[in-house]
Amino acid sequence: MPSKSFRLSIVTPERILFEGQASYISVPGAGGYMGILADHASLITPLKAGIFQFRTAGAVQPMVFKTRHGGLFEVDRNQVSVLLEAADSAVLDPS
């Protein structure tokens, strides 16, 4: 049976913004927004500035934050990493 969640890390060079289990993430990729669920195929892609949304495992409302900076996005065996150049806010708020 497929996993329902994956390990998510959202980091900048200065700090860890989030680390924990998530069930969904939407990121502004170089070719447009993309959504990721558990058991997604491996990928690495650059990120553009924009709105990021993710839902922690079991949560109803997604967490939302916006950045004016790009970065890198990696998915590998239910480990998802968002590596940002910088973040506009240290606080991730539910929408």
Image (cartoon, helix red, strand yellow):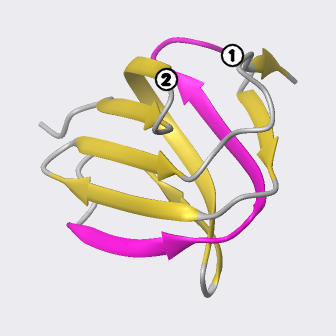
Give the Cα separation between the discs numbered 2 and 1: 26 Å
**Residue 76 appears left or right of 43:** left
**Residue 71 appears left or right of 31:** left
Residue 62 is situated, as x and y percent measured from the top left of the image, at 71, 27
Per the rendered image, the range of residues in magenta is 42-60
Of labels 2 and 1, earlier in sequence is 2
Q: Is residue 58 magenta?
A: yes
Viewport quadrant of the N terminus: top left
Give the amino acid at mark 1.
Answer: Val
Residue beneath the point at 69% across and 16% down: 60
Dominant secondary-structure state across the stretch colored magenta: strand
Where residue 49 sits, quadrant-wise, is bottom right
The residue to which callout 2 is attached is 15
Seen from the viewer's position, the closer of residues 53 and 16 is 16
The residue to which callout 1 is attached is 60
Residue beneath the point at 46% across and 38% down: 13
Q: Residue furthest right?
A: 95
At numbered mark 1, what does the secondary structure look like: helix, strand or loop?
loop
